Amino acid sequence: MKYSRVLGTGSHLPSRVVTNADLEAIVDTNATWIRERTGIEQRHLVSEGETCCDLAEAAARKALEAAGIQASDLDLILVATTTPDQFFPSTACLLQQRLDVHGCPAFDLQAVCAGFVYAMDVADKFIRTGAAKHALVVGAETISRLLDWTDRGTCVLFGDGAGAVVLGAAEEPGIISTHLHADGAYKDLLQVPGGHGNGRPEAAFMEMKGNEVFRIAVTTLGRIVDETLEANNLSKSDIDWLIPHQANIRIIQATARKLDLPMERVVVTVAEHGNTSSASIPLAFDQAVRDGRIQRGQTLLMEAFGGGFTWGSVLIRY
Ligand code: COA
């Protein structure tokens, strides 16, 4: 039986930092409210001309270097994104060209904030079936471009960035299990309603019923944690690190409580990054790998929840 394991990680943030105080100047909000209700202190935002593929490429190159392989060794490129540079070709194909890779499958995967865990699941299955030996999995977003900067209920919450992981085939896990779910019944609670497909390109901005999303996110993430532990016959104390999607510190704290995990064992980047959608987990993962918190052999639980709704987990022996 083949498994996939993490060979290397990388991440990249745009250089422009926007603090909560900066937002006070453009929308009716205040820095204290944002910090107290979300845990966010600042976010990185792309500048004019900077694209999702720019962020993805920088993160991918660092992950390849950390993995110690060449881009030409890749036989799968997956980009989880809701904010591709263009309708097509996919950001994965644009990235493939920048990396000077030719011929291997490359495609985008759209599951909003759960996009990275979805992409890890897909890449893991490619590797387990022998269809790929080395997979590049990127979560990259310029989510700021989908925001209505007059809507204080959403625009203060998000940031831009990218994170990447190189997976390689191995005899032992690696990725122990993945669990994915979706329920389109909740499509109206968190959405970008417009697009060229429905003839409403002018409505391509995010709308969210924050309160309801919050409530459902907390209970759903609690369930996915239980499901993951039960499926693997693990107890809460077997988890060394929780690497959650970074939407709101209060949601993260609720999941940590559910796991009886002290916050010191949770990788938290929401204060510096805000919610970077599909990029948030690989950004947090890379940060904790590079600063030495996450060590080889430890058990990591990633979990995410996003528009759709989509949600899922990835359990890893790093
Ligand atoms: N600045 C200042 N005040 C704000 C504000 C802002 N940016 N946004 C909302 N408010 C106000 C509201 O207007 C409301 O005022 P009122 O009581 O006078 O009507 C008050 O703050 C409370 O609003 P409410 O929406 O109940 O706040 P909340 O505690 O639920 O926090 C969110 C709002 C959005 C931070 C929270 O609901 C949340 O994080 N939801 C989940 C979001 C999420 O995770 N989305 C992505 C999933 S991937």
Image: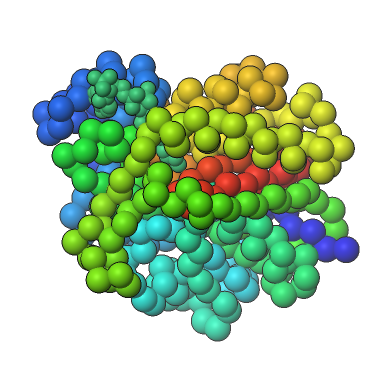
In the rendered image, which quarter is residue 42 located in?
top left
Q: Is residue 96 left or right of residue 302?
A: left
Q: Nearer the viewer, residue 221 or 26?
A: 221
- Residue 13's x, y, as percent? 37, 45
Give the quarter of the figure containing the N terminus. Answer: bottom right
Q: Nearer the viewer, residue 73 or 301?
A: 301
- Residue 49's x, y, as percent? 21, 59
Q: Nearer the viewer, residue 193 or 111?
A: 193
Count every numbered label the image shows and give the total.
Answer: 0
Image point 65% across, 45% down: which residue? Answer: 313
Q: Quadrant of ligand 1?
A: top left
Q: Residue furthest bottom?
A: 103
Q: Is residue 135 left or right of residue 133?
A: left
38 is higher (above) or lower (below) than 175:
above
Image point 72% across, 75% down: which residue? Answer: 131
46 is higher (above) or lower (below) than 199:
above
Q: Is residue 295 left or right of residue 102?
A: right
- Residue 29's x, y, as percent? 20, 25
Residue 33 visible to the viewer:
yes
- Residue 318's x, y, as percent? 72, 43
Q: Nearer the viewer, residue 223 or 276?
A: 223
Image point 25% across, 71% down: which residue? Answer: 199
Q: Residue furthest left?
A: 25
In the rendered image, which quarter is residue 103 located in?
bottom right
130 is higher (above) or lower (below) than 270:
below
Image point 69% across, 50% down: which residue? Answer: 179
